[in-house]
Image (cartoon, rainbow, N blue to C red):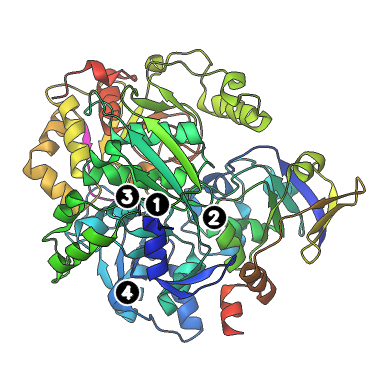
Amino acid sequence: MGKTLFEKIWDAHIVVENENSPSLIYIDRHLIHEVTSPQAFDGLRMNNRSVRRPDLTIATMDHNVPTNNRTLPILDQTSAVQIHTLEKNCKDFGIQLFDIDSPDQGIVHVIGPQLGITLPGSTIVCGDSHTSTHGAFGALAFGIGTSEVEHVLASQTLWLEKPKPFEIRVKGKRKNPHAVTAKDIVLSIIKNIGTSGGNGTVIEYRGEGIRDLSMEQRMTICNMSIEAGARTGIIAPDEKTFEYLRGRKYTPKNYESLVDYWRDNLKTDSDAKFEKNYTLHIDNIAPQVSWGTNPGMTCDVTESIPFPEDFSKGDQNQKKGAEKALEYMALKPGTPITEIKIDRVFIGSCTNARLEDLIEASKVVKGRKLSPYVRAMVVPGSQMVKKQAEELGLDKIFTDANFEWREAGCSMCLGMNPDILSPGERCASTSNRNFEGRQGTGGRTHLVSPVMAAAAAIEGHFVDVREMDLN
Amino acid sequence: MKGNVIKYERDNIDTDVIIPGQYLKVHDYAELALHAMEGLDPDFHSKVKEGDFILSGRNFGCGSSREHAPIALSHSGIKAVLALSFARIFYRNAVDGAFLLPIEIEDDAYSNISEGDEIDIDIHTNEIKNLTKNKTYKMKPFSEIIGKIIESGGLFKYKSD
């Protein structure tokens, strides 16, 4: 019997194999950041261990860096300590760091691919759940906890339970690919399979609906695999993948021979078996807006807030969850999504802060003005994205419309830096999680695409972006 | 292992309510514990006792990879979380640092055990006894290596044995 792409990469990285128990897997690239690494380095020091492969370990600071003026000192003392701790740890252990002043600094999942560090067929880990993003390149990429970070630092290996392969086929063509984006595809998937629909699996996204996507759009899809409960997501590499990585700063010197190997080997065999299958037809899908407190609580922009009994389809926990979510979100069932007024807009995060995301959002904003009732920020995913966007004049389009144009970082995705919502504020956000308090205590998050976020910023409420001129 | 149950009758208890993002900068575990479950249940800190268990629905611990989540619960006194299913990273974080036991249960235990019930968990027989209601339920056994990591007291203790 043939193998799936994920099984081929898994098998190529086994150090110790165990049936029905975790196997020891070799790790090709380890990305670290300031929040989940300090205790891991403490552990190494306590036990007199060194970093096994500092040359395969790459660090940046993204989670708690301020996104305003970089020439100012960091006011939050605990953040400053975490940032300086990472600097010291990288220096002591010989790890390359893209620090706050580096032109290559940015969200770890944005800079990995951008620098050519993320490669097809490799295993990648990072102490961050959205490591699944790198799966867009045909890499097997897992988010891990701090004890596991320490284990990888010390041994370049990790005990992992073998996930089950899950095929998600995306069929058809979007009629308006500017208005119905990769974010809308992945939110539709999560809405349909649920936030635990992918538990224990690696999702391989396949089909023409995936092939048609650019690399940056594929990253948005793989990024949110974790929100469907999957261990990670993966997409077989193709010519778009190879072209994206060609000639980047850290692309290997023998790149073309690697491409020949990848082209022949990194695909699922035609007779391979998946444990689970799901198919999404995208011909007629609408732009998506989340209304609740997990990413599965999402509906079409043309719909109304659902009644908990309809949403739950008889499941008591789902019903209670929906009732609690509506209470937290201060929303009434039956309210049309387009009547929800917003206070804040966040265009950023490892899900949607790449150059294409900013280009698409700028098309909505160009020549228009921000609603006087809304505060909107655009936070590029990396300093390199910021520079490229500025070369295209995007910063001017946003600032002319009264949007804030900021420095790279995780920013308002996770409420651990100065960019947060105030209690009760409602935000249209291009990030990945609408959990209670995620963007700040009492903050209310609606997950949307960059285009929808930009349109909501202009109009002050959600709109069907298919009706706008986006070409 | 005996203790009383704190029950959250819902699915998808996420890491951001277990320990909100603003506390990820806190290095001191005792201080982290003060904020455990703050996003969901502000009374948690005042009601939790050493040796208590949490009982919840599907996909417990979904979301972020923050190890702070099991650490905050563990330093509040929680010895085990019983849930219908777990998000993988939370599960591994709980086991790797030997912070608490993530125990997968079936529907009967989930619906039958009530808030405040005293239960006795035996990870060798894979049984949960409800001492308040005088009932017994099955738990899903740990896989071999996970069991060994738990017995050793965490990933690094297991590796150096």
Q: Which residue is mark 1?
A: A271
Residue A35 belongs to magenta span: no
Q: Secondary structure at mark 3?
A: loop
Q: Is residue A154 left or right of residue A117?
A: right
Q: Residue at x 53, y 16 (%)?
A: A332
Q: Residues within 10 Å of mark 1 (few under 14, many from 20)?
A: few
In front of the other: label 2 or label 4? 2
- Give the amino acid at mark 3: Ile
Q: Which residue is mark 3?
A: A235
- Is residue A105 in sight in this rendering? no
Marks 4 & 1, CB-CB < 8 Å contact: no
Q: Which residue is mark 4?
A: A90
Magenta part mainly helix, strand or loop?
Answer: loop
In front of the other: label 2 or label 3? 3
**Separation of marks 4 and 1 at Cα, in angstroms:** 46 Å
- Point out residue A336 in the picture as x, y percentages from the top left corner: 43, 13
**Separation of marks 2 and 4 at Cα, in angstroms:** 28 Å
Q: Sequence-wise, which precedes: disc 3 or disc 4?
A: 4
Q: Residue at x 34, y 31 (%)?
A: A184
- Give the amino acid at mark 1: Asp
